């Protein structure tokens, strides 16, 4: 009689613990469980065509807003040119921090300021990452700009039309990102023979005055057929910038090497002096104690 009673007691305790765990998940983790259920029920089980319809609808509704247009321009300059990259970027930049803030406020509203600062930090990290990608692509373009100007100038000086030189300008660049952008620019011009539509590829993917100057030179060359002097002048300007940047990078590398050597020497000095200092302290303590 004792064994069945003990078994029933153990079964009751286990069931009670399981019920408490379920209640804990529903009450304390209801937001996580709810979001997971929504994802698997609404998104995960939908067909790819239905997902595309949802994203198309969101893109259509948000494309009228200025901040969406600004976000789309930023993410495109960062190298993300997919159809749904702007809406995904907005969801990460604005939607995710807002979701985290809402869930945290439901759990503990007393930490409002901490949650707000945390969400601001998340958005700032995303922004810094995107701006870093934009700066990297812009720097790579400025580094190769003098090659583009030299190629176009040499082609025109040898009697080749600028419209023919444009179609092969991507061959001067080794960087994959810049090369792909210039290939798309050349292909667009070759298919449409519309310089404004082709230049849109450069304007939308690069930032800075160098891209605007290149577009102006190409537009002037296609319209007038004579931009040799402008291309030569810009070649000299961009080559000087490239050379100055190389000097600055070399000087920066030299400074880093010197600082690294100083830090290494400082660490060695500290490691060697610690035992001496400890022995000196022990000696002084023994003198004063005695």
Image: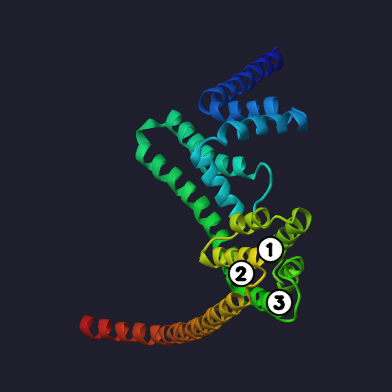
Q: Earlier in the sequence, mark 2 or mark 3?
A: 2
Identify the disc placed on residue 177. 1
User: Which quadrant, please, contains the N terminus?
Assistant: top right
Measured as percent of width and height from the top left, residue 173 is found at 70, 72
SS for dot 3: helix
Disc 3 crowd rating (10 Å Cα; few below 14, some 14-19, many 20+) is many
Mark 1 or mark 3, which has the lower sequence index? 3
Q: Is residue 115 left or right of residue 52?
A: left
Q: Nearer the viewer, mark 1 or mark 3?
A: 3
Residue shown at the point (51%, 27%) measured from the top left: 28
Picture layout, residue 117 above or below residue 268: above
Is 109 on the left or on the right of 74, as rendered?
left
- Residue at 54%, 43% (x, y): give it: 69
Residue 154 at x, y = what percent? 70, 80
Other-residue count near label 1 (Cα within 10 Å), few / some / many at <14 / 14–19 / ≥20: some
Crowdedness near tag 2: few (<14), some (14–19) or many (≥20) residues, C-alpha within 10 Å: some
User: CA separation, marks 1 and 3?
Assistant: 26 Å
Q: Position of residue 75 (x, y in %)?
A: 59, 50
Q: CA distance from mark 2 to mark 3?
A: 25 Å
* Numbered marks: total: 3
* Residue of label 2: 140
The correct choice, above or below, for 6 with respect to 35 in the image is: above
Residue mark closest to the camera, 2 vs 3: 3
Dot 1 or dot 2, earlier in sequence: 2
Asked if labels 2 and 1 touch by Cβ distance under 8 angstroms, the answer is yes
Q: Which residue is mark 3?
A: 156
Distance of label 1 from label 2 (alpha carbons): 9 Å
Is label 2 in a helix, a strand or a loop? helix
Find numbered disc 1 in the image and state the secondary structure of the residue it sits on: helix
């Amino acid at each position: 009689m004792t064994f069945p009673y003990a078994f029933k007691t153990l079964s009751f305790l286990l069931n009670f613990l399981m019920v408490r765990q379920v209640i804990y998940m529903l009450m304390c983790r209801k937001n996580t469980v709810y979001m997971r259920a929504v994802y698997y029920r609404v998104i995960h089980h939908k067909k790819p065509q239905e997902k595309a319809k949802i994203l198309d609808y969101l893109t259509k509704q948000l494309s009228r807003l200025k901040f969406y247009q600004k976000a789309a321009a930023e993410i495109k300059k960062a190298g993300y040119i997919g159809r749904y990259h702007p809406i995904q970027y907005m969801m990460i930049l604005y939607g995710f921090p807002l979701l985290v803030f809402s869930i945290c406020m439901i759990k503990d509203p007393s930490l409002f300021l901490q949650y707000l600062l945390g969400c601001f930090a998340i958005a700032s990290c995303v922004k810094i990452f995107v701006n870093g990608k934009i700066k990297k692509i812009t720097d790579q373009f400025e580094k190769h700009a003098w090659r583009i100007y030299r190629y176009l100038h040499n082609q025109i000086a040898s009697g080749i039309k600028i419209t023919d030189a444009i179609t092969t300008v991507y061959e001067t660049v080794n960087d994959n990102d810049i090369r792909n952008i210039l290939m798309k620019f050349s292909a667009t011009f070759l298919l449409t023979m519309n310089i404004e539509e082709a230049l849109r590829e450069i304007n939308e993917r690069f930032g800075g005055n160098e891209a605007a100057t290149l577009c102006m030179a190409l537009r002037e060359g296609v319209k007038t057929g004579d931009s040799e002097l402008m291309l030569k002048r810009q070649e000299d300007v961009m080559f000087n910038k490239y050379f100055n940047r190389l000097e600055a990078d070399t000087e920066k590398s030299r400074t880093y090497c010197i600082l690294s050597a100083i830090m290494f020497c400082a660490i060695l000095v500290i490691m060697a002096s610690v035992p001496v200092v400890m022995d000196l302290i022990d000696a002084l303590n023994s003198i004063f104690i005695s």
